[in-house]
Amino acid sequence: MLKALHLSHVYIACGTTDLRKSIDGLAVLVQEQFHLDPFSPALFVFCNRQRDKHKLLHWDHNGFWLYYRRLERGRFRWPTDIKSQTLSISHRQLQWLLDGLSLEQHLAHPQVKAHAIV
């Protein structure tokens, strides 16, 4: 589902967020606390204190989308010890988080930025 979205950035809110917030509450959080534009082509991801729920917010043409995910078992490996309020991550790292993995997968193949065929 998320692969079909045309997003320039993925931002996660480090630490925990009160997920009782609605679309408007999360958009205000993005704008006023994170100093980011909630209307930009970006995905904003939030996690609750128990780390078993996510809300994902993004603007699309003429309205916001709000996705909600609740785990029946287990917890997300959410970064809580990072100094900044937000962290820009890749689409690949987002998929790792949603799959219950950490942001850093040292055994994964690193991205190759090729510039010529040898």
Image (cartoon, rainbow, N blue to C red):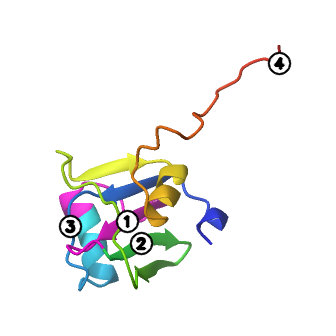
Residue behind mark 3? 16
Disc nearer the start of the sequence (2/4): 2
Q: Are marks 3 and 2 in contact (CB under 8 Å)?
A: no
Disc 3/disc 2 C-alpha distance (Å): 13 Å
The residue at the point 34 percent across, 81 percent down is: 23
Residue behind mark 4? 117
Residue behind mark 2? 56
In the image, which disc is placed on residue 45? 1
Disc 3/disc 1 C-alpha distance (Å): 11 Å
Q: What element carries label 3?
A: loop
The residue at the point 48 percent across, 70 percent down is: 59
Count every numbered label the image shows and give the total. 4
Q: Can residue 41 be seen in this view?
A: no
Q: Do the residues labelled 4 and 3 touch (CB within 8 Å)?
A: no
Q: How crowded is mark 4: few (under 14 residues within 10 Å), some or many (20 or more)?
A: few
Disc nearer the start of the sequence (1/2): 1
Q: Do the residues labelled 3 and 1 touch (CB within 8 Å)?
A: no
Q: Tell me the kind of residue under disc 3.
A: Thr
> Magenta stretch: residue 42 in it?
yes
Q: Nearer the viewer, residue 74 or 56?
A: 74
Task: Report the magenta residues as a range.
Answer: 31-51
